[in-house]
Image (cartoon, grey):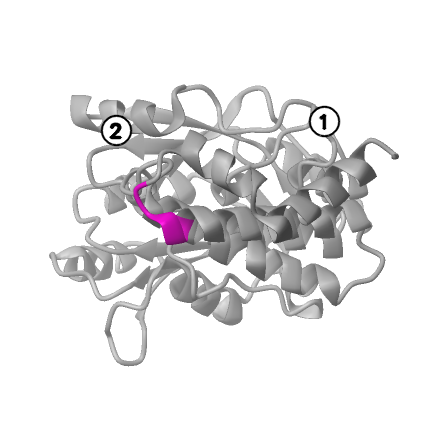
Amino acid sequence: MNISVIIPVYNAAEYVEKSVRSVLQFDIVKEILLIDDGSQDNSAEICKTIAATDSRIKFMQHPDKKNHGVSATRNLGIDLASQEFISFLDADDYYLPNRFDAEKEYLKNPGIDGVFGALATEFISDEGRRQYMEKFATDGLTTVRKEGEGKEIFLGLTGITKDFGTFFSMIALTVRKSALDRYSLRLSEKMKIGEDKEFIIKLSYHTHLKSGLINVPVAIRTGHENNTITKIKNNSGAFFHHNYLLYSSLYQWAKKHRDIPEEARELFKYKSLSSKVASDKGLLKYFNFIRYSLFNPKLLKTRYRYYALKNNY
């Protein structure tokens, strides 16, 4: 295996060296794309210094050297990656020694396009832990609940199969670059959150994925008070707005692929509409949003169609 690891960097001066060092332990990693995304601290200077220590590390920036967001930065990395496989890492996270154990076995099979594993969280501040627990209510593994392969994974991530799990982290994913290019799979640059969920759902539909080490972590997310993922509070207007962007995008995409189960399209449509109602209502509590949606004819019809499909009515 020959792997390119893409590391977007934004104001991560405190963490980026540990992140890169965790990747250098693997001989199968032939390229590390260290991409500064317009950092306001001294991250760029640190990255240049790190890059000088190993020929596999390539430091780069956007052509205008400005901040474009994590999706645009990952997309730039995908476009420029030169190796057969691509993996992702954030500049404040790091890989464990077992990171590619499953990949080295399963990706010998040319019929498998990608493998994913589990992610754990290491808190380095009390405030980081507090924010994370407030957001997710658990500090357990970010992973799926059972092994899967192929369309099983798509049905699980969409929520059609209830006992599978609806998310895994891109930091625990390794995928063939040719598969991403074949289907023009890139991350949405319009979303601030949820872009990774949209990406892995589309990836699970277009390509053949397989679960790897899902019961033990293969990488570590560093939990601190500046984590982007914890900044948007659950059930806030912003939370529902981002959910609307996510599910309306998935719904429009699903309409173009008629072999996607109708149940999935209806689910995307319902979540899109319900999130739009909640977003428009702003400060409504979640139970008030549910009560409102029950009397919204458009929402009610979509909800009924989804549950009718789900229960074979």
The answer to whether residue 193 is seen in the rendering is no
Residue 256 occupies quadrant: bottom right
**Magenta stretch, main secondary structure class:** helix
**Residue 281 among magenta residues:** yes
Q: Residue at x 48, y 58 (%)?
A: 245
Q: Nearer the viewer, mark 1 or mark 2?
A: 2
Q: Secondary structure at mark 2?
A: helix
Q: Amino acid at mark 2?
A: Gln
- Residue to which mark 1 is pinned: 147
Distance (Cα) linking label 1 and label 2? 30 Å
Q: Residue furthest left?
A: 41
Q: Which residues are magenta?
A: 279-283
Residue 58 placed where, x, y %?
36, 64
Q: Judging from the image, what secondary structure is the residue with disc 1 in?
A: loop
Give the residue number, with chain letter if any, for mark 2.
131
Q: Which residue is at a point 19% across and 61% down the rendered structure image?
A: 39
Q: Is residue 6 above or below residue 296?
A: below
Q: Residues within 10 Å of mark 2 (few under 14, many from 20)?
A: many
